[in-house]
Image: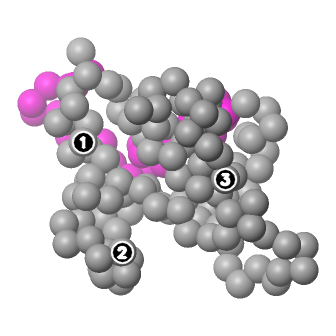
Amino acid sequence: MTHTSPGAIAPDLALIEQLAHGAIAGLPGPYRAAATLVRLRIEDFAPDEILEALEIDDPFDLTGLYEGIPLTEKSITDQPMQPDVIWLFRRPILDEWLDRGDVSLQELVTHVLVHELAHHFGWSDEDIARIDPWWE
């Protein structure tokens, strides 16, 4: 069973961050080191300015986001303006986890993180499927 008892406290931001770091630690070697250079931000929901920019009305519709320039588009002559960031949004992740009811929270956090890392690394669907067997 993937859920806890009805009286349990919902997983907090620190647990989601811990699960995300665990997912990074589980990546294949060549990607693990590079993934540690991407900043992780864990928030309950996406900030309003992100939702507006993406034209998303319901904050529960966004579980994660990659902000940055994919490695496949970066040039050594580019001056980084800000670090690459992967945002994970706790409440939408928890909502999806409860709705699915058939995956662990670790599996879902890993899935969302890998999807966002795919934007950073420029992975194809086949690349993602090799790293995340749960890829749909």
- Asked if the residues shown at circle 2 and circle 3 are in contact, with their CB atoms under 8 angstroms apart, the answer is no
Picture quadrant where residue 25 is located: top right
In the image as oriented, which residue stretches furthest toward the right? 76
Indicate the position of residue 134 as horizontal and vertical percent values: 45, 26
98 shown above or below 104: below
Indicate the position of residue 5 as horizontal and vertical percent values: 14, 25
**Residue, disc 1:** 96
- Relative depth, front residue between 122 and 11: 122
**Residue, disc 2:** 54
For the C terminus, the quadrant is: top left
38 shown above or below 25: below
Checking the image for residue 122, the label placed there is 3
The magenta span reads 2-27
Q: Earlier in the sequence, mark 2 or mark 3?
A: 2
The secondary element bearing badge 3 is classed as loop
28 shown above or below 67: above
Picture quadrant where residue 45 is located: bottom left
Picture quadrant where residue 109 is located: top left
70 shown above or below 102: below
Left or right for 63, reference 71: left
Q: Earlier in the sequence, mark 1 or mark 2?
A: 2
Residue type at numbered disc 1 = Glu
- Relative depth, front residue between 1 and 81: 81
The secondary element bearing badge 1 is classed as helix
